[in-house]
Amino acid sequence: MTSFDPRLAGSSRRPFHLEDRPRKERRAFNVPGHAHYLTFSCSHGLPLLNRDRTRLWLLETMDRARTSHQVDLYAYVIMPEHAHLLVRPQRDKYDISGFLYAVKRPLSFKAKRFLQQQGEAEWLARLTTQCGSQGRFHFWQPGGGYDRNLTRTSSLRPVIEYIHNNPVRRGFVARPTDWPWSSARYWADSSEGPLNMDQLPS
């Protein structure tokens, strides 16, 4: 069962450095049985995910997308400028790009609407690019992000550990479980965490 705790906190003012950026994006390969290690970033590397409100939006869209696209969610971490997910489609025929679209697009709509309601003209302009006579709002960096196929079950736990250690490597916290915006607490103690994870295959 999913539970959201709006009291969760966590942010940092440390800038996003080049070495923190996800590796070069690659084409998505929809191979039956493969898990996918996904990374997607905010527009221009901006820390648009440094507010609890926005992080909760992302958790909500992740949860809806994994249900609608029948995807197991094994791990995640939300950093100020990007997010990592480890997922595995339940069906042999799937579209990982469609799953990512279902995660990212609703949050972008929410963010744009929030900025409009708050009268944040400067931020709206900063995140909008002109395409002919029309402006296009970009909460996310254009492109599919990074997608790595994991072919073996034995690869899952090392990747989960790597995902959970992102905030530690950045110096935000001393231990992965100190960062509330990841699945580290769930795997340490399944009674904690804003989202429940799916069980790993044996």
Image (cartoon, rainbow, N blue to C red):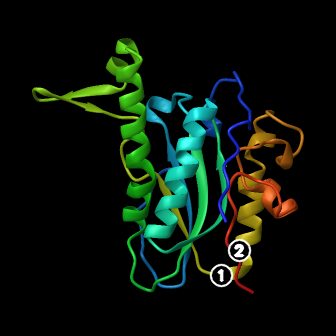
Q: Is residue 70 left or right of residue 94?
A: right
Q: Residue at x 67, y 57 (%)?
A: 195
Q: Quadrant of residue 159?
A: bottom right
* Secondary structure under the numbered disc 2 in the rendered image: helix
Check disc 2 and give the amino acid type: Ser
- Residue 12 position in % (x across, y down): 72, 26
- Residue 41 position in % (x across, y down): 50, 42
Residue identifier under label 1 = 152
- Residue 9 position in % (x across, y down): 74, 33
Q: In which quadrant is the C terminus drawn?
A: bottom right
Q: Nearer the viewer, residue 104 or 52?
A: 52
Q: Residue at x 88, y 45 (%)?
A: 175
Check disc 1 and give the amino acid type: Arg
Check residue 162 in the rendering and tell me which mark sits there, or answer none.
Answer: none
- Residue 128 position in % (x across, y down): 30, 26
Q: State the separation of the CA atoms marked 1 and 2.
A: 6 Å
The answer to whether residue 129 shows anywhere in this view is yes
Residue identifier under label 2 = 155
Q: Residue at x 49, y 50 (%)?
A: 24
Q: Callout 2: 10 Å neighbours few (<14), some, many (20+)?
A: few
Extreme-left residue of the structure: 133
* Pointers 1 and 2 in contact (C-beta within 8 Å): yes
Q: In which quadrant is the N terminus drawn?
A: bottom right
* Secondary structure under the numbered disc 1 in the rendered image: loop
